[in-house]
Image: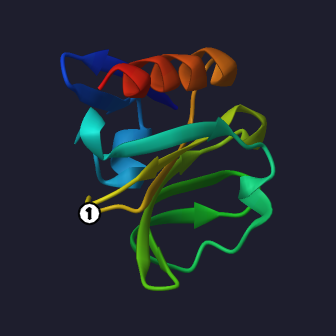
Amino acid sequence: MANVSIDGDNLIVEIEGLDKLWALRSRLVIPLANVRGATADPGISREAKGFRAPGTHLPGVITAGTFHIHGERVFWDVHDATKAVVIELADERYARLVVEVSDPRATVALIERATAVS
């Protein structure tokens, strides 16, 4: 699971627990100027992931780490797809972040408010 917050002009994604090990990342810092938007998307887990490099993928259990698909890098940290949020990025290492959060609606609202101001 991930904790998403706003710190000044940055979106902070903190990877929690053992997911740090599975995703090979503990924290992502993204300038809000590079965040295009966010959506809650429980169906995203059924989509193709591409190839993982590096990361972990056990279908139905966990998808975590960096995945490459259609020439893009996508960061995943999802166990429970019903809590998945997709964060669209521009001019960043990752084209998208797909993370599981405790409250998808609140997380999307937080990101949308922050990007409307920046």
Q: Can you name the residue that lies furthest to the front here?
A: 117
Please report the residue visible at 57 percent of the width from the left and 80 percent of the height from the top: 50
Q: Secondary structure at mark 1?
A: loop
Q: Amino acid at mark 1?
A: Arg
> Looking at the image, can residue 27 be seen?
no
**Horizontal placement of 39 versus 91: left or right?**
right
Whether residue 117 is situated above or below residue 43 in the rendered picture: above
Please name whichever residue, 55 or 98, is drawn nearer the observer in this view of the structure: 98
Please report the residue visible at 20 percent of the width from the left and 24 percent of the height from the top: 9
> Looking at the image, can residue 9 be seen?
yes
Whether residue 93 is situated above or below residue 109 in the rendered picture: below
Q: x, y percentage for residue 49?
A: 61, 72
Please name whichever residue, 23 or 49, is drawn nearer the observer in this view of the structure: 49
**Horizontal placement of 56 versus 45: left or right?**
left
Q: Which residue is mark 1?
A: 93
Please report the residue visible at 46 percent of the width from the left and 56 percent of the height from the top: 96
Q: x, y percentage for residue 84?
A: 66, 39
Please report the residue visible at 55 percent of the width from the left and 21 percent of the height from the top: 107
